[in-house]
């Protein structure tokens, strides 16, 4: 079966090839590009957390398009270093990615370029410590229709995801993220993309 129509209409995905799959879960796994690693765009992330939440004792964070979960654990770890208690929810369309996130087990590839390391060696792999796993949660979902109540997160973080969304659905995607979160942090390339598209977050 061909899934393009559903993937484009319901998930806002920008597709350049025909997607054949036996079911929707398989189709979503096929279109997902889960590229990510620990501490990606760390400087910007730290600045966002520090500027907005350094006075908070506890925050709830949503990582939209969390990939395999490196972003989720990085946020949980950074909050801990800032003495902020947190729950971090990672949302992605791909069940395969979420399973890796939930396992908390990674190859060295996810650790590339890391100067600090909070993972423990596990054979030839790396494992996220259980105290960080405790506050990290993984949810299957679609950013075009987030399964959360209005303003239920202190922060929504969306990085390296908007590039996969159709241009004409970007406003809708941003509005949905702003609906569930009080503050929105976008990645460097996501911000660049919006700038190129002439989308100004403050006037949405
Ligand atoms: C390149 S990864 C980014 C991972 C992480 N945010 C980072 O910056 O390292 C993009 C992720 O967005 C997810 N994604 C794409 N469209 C989505 C949608 N409509 N809803 C939820 N997740 C989506 C993909 O499955 C993929 O895992």
Image (tube, rainbow, N blue to C red):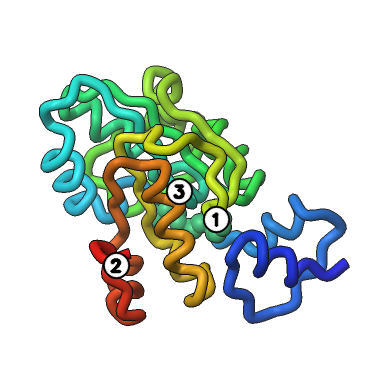
Q: Which of disc 3 and disc 2 is earlier in sequence? A: 3
Q: Which of disc 1 and disc 2 is earlier in sequence? A: 1
Q: Residue at x 41, y 46 (%)?
A: 179
Q: Residue at x 19, y 46 (%)?
A: 48
Q: Is residue 14 above or below residue 128?
A: below
Residue 203: give x, y in percent of width and height: 27, 66
Q: Is residue 94 left or right of residue 129?
A: right
Q: Nearer the viewer, residue 43 or 114?
A: 43
Q: Which of disc 1 and disc 3 is earlier in sequence? A: 3
Which type of secondary structure does the marked residue at label 2 adopt? helix
Q: Is residue 197 above or below residue 190?
A: below
Res 134 → quadrant: top left
Please tell me the numbered disc located at residue 144: 1
Residue, disc 2: 191
Which type of secondary structure does the marked residue at label 3 adopt? strand
Q: Nearer the viewer, residue 164 or 41?
A: 164
Q: CA distance from mark 2 to mark 3?
A: 15 Å
Q: Does ligand 1 reach within 8 Å of label 3's beta carbon?
A: yes
Q: CA distance from mark 2 to mark 1?
A: 18 Å
Q: Quadrant of the N terminus?
A: bottom right
Residue, disc 3: 64
For the residues bearing labels 2 and 1, Cβ distance under 8 angstroms = no
């Amino acid at each position: 079966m061909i899934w393009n129509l559903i993937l484009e209409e319901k998930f806002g995905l920008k597709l350049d090839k025909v997607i054949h799959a036996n079911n929707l879960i398989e189709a979503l796994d096929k279109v997902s590009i889960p590229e990510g690693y620990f501490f990606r765009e760390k400087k910007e992330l730290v600045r966002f957390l520090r500027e907005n939440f350094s006075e908070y004792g506890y925050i709830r964070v949503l990582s939209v398009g969390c990939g395999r979960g490196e972003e989720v654990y990085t946020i949980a770890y950074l909050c801990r270093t800032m003495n902020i208690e947190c729950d971090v929810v990672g949302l992605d369309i791909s069940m395969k990615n979420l399973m890796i996130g939930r396992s908390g087990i990674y190859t060295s590839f996810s650790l590339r370029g890391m100067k600090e390391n909070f993972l423990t060696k596990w054979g030839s792999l790396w494992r996220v410590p259980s105290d960080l796993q405790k506050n990290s949660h993984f949810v299957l979902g679609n950013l075009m229709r987030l399964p959360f109540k209005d303003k239920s997160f202190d922060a929504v973080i969306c990085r390296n995801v908007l590039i996969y969304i159709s241009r004409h659905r970007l406003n809708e995607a941003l509005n949905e993220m702003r609906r569930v979160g009080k503050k929105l942090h976008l990645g460097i390339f996501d911000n660049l993309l919006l700038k190129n598209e002439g989308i100004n977050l403050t006037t949405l």
